[in-house]
Amino acid sequence: MTDTTTDQPPRLDDSGSRATRAGDSIFSGLASAAGLTILLALAGVALFLVIEGAPAFTASGESAYGKDNIVVYVWPLLYGTLLAAVLAMVIVTPLAVGLALVISHYAPRRVGTYLGYLIDLLAAVPSVVYGLWGRVVLAPALLPLYLWLSDNLGWIPFFDGGESGPTHGRTIFTAGIVLAVMALPIVTAICREVFIQTPRIHEEAALALGATKWEMIRMTVFPYARSGVISAVLLGLGRALGETMAVAMVLSGAGIITIDLIGTQNPSTIAANIALNFGNASGSKINTLIFSGLVLFVVSFAVNFVGRWIASRGEVKG
């Protein structure tokens, strides 16, 4: 007797099919609404900054805090913002890459997991706490180092220290260290995930050919993760560019342009300058501060956009 039964997937009745399609439609609509809300919020912020900052184009004198025009006022702040953020990235990049390699390839699985959790928890520390740590603990601890650098390496412009030498540790270099610690979690997390995604077969092939573990990492992990590491650094740079309270509490800014990293007078940052002056600003000064915020918005958006673009290119190639 022939068995006419076959293994076929169960059929959904009309009510089940309609319920599934309705759930997909609802989820799709909610996801689209969430994405549109983010875009509208971003556009609203940009529109507000443009409208409120436009009057500052003609600001001068008292309206531009004693400067001849808005460019002369904003340029030192932009320079200080970029200098502090770049210093942070120079410090954090090798540290973050090394930590990510330890977590993904060197440490035992359990130790690496707990170490990853510990690094991620740094992102939960409020900015004010970092600012207090930098001002009360780090700055005094670094002052002897700054004095030594000024006495022994003062012929290098970066460690000039000024005529009177370093008198406190609240310098642009200290602010860069604080920003590096704050950017460490995001850079490490992205690098760690990219390193883990390296095809296992490539790593095993390198080891089978006689490569040491470091040679395997250099020949397989780093080439595969190049775009991911670059995007991680750029996203960390975007994080450092917009930091406000920690820099405002640590940095003793004077609104100047200098390459001296340990001097008494340091360039300020846009975010810190807004935080310190907005409470006492009125009239056209508010427009001047908002215009500086617009400059920071454009720079941060560009850096984050480039980082996301590089990351997406790496995903497509992978």
Image: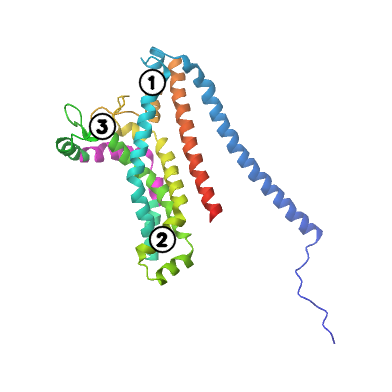
Question: Observer-nearest residue: 282 or 172?
Answer: 172
Please state which amino acid type lies under the numbered disc 1.
Answer: Tyr
Up the image or down, 96 lies above or below 300; here it is below
Q: Left or right of 24: which side holds 82? A: left
Residue 186 location, x and y as percent?
42, 47
Foreground residue, 47 or 246?
A: 47
Q: Earlier in the sequence, mark 2 or mark 1?
A: 1
What residue is at 42 percent from the left and 19 percent from the top?
70
Label 1: element kind? helix
Taking the view exactly as shown, the residue that stands out farthest to the bottom is: 1
Q: Name the dominant secondary structure of the magenta segment.
A: helix
Would you name the residue on which mark 3 appears?
260
In the rendered image, residue 167, in percent from the top left (x then y), is placed at: 19, 31
User: Dot 2, how many residues are within 10 Å of its Cα: few (below 14), some (14-19), or many (20+)?
Assistant: some
Question: Mark 2 touching mark 3, by CB under 8 A?
Answer: no
Where residue 66 sits, quadrant-wise, is top left
Residue 73 got which mark? 1
Residue shown at 25% from the left, 35% from the top: 158
Q: Residue at x 44, y 14 (%)?
A: 59
In the rendered structure, which amino acid carries the disc numbered 2?
Answer: Met
Can residue 194 be seen here?
A: no
Q: Residue furthest left?
A: 151
Q: CA distance from mark 2 to mark 3?
A: 39 Å
Label 2, on which residue? 219
Where disc 3 sits, the SS reads loop
Q: Which residues are magenta?
A: 120-141
Q: Is-magenta flag for residue 121? A: yes
Real-space Cα separation, disc 3 to disc 1, in angstroms: 20 Å
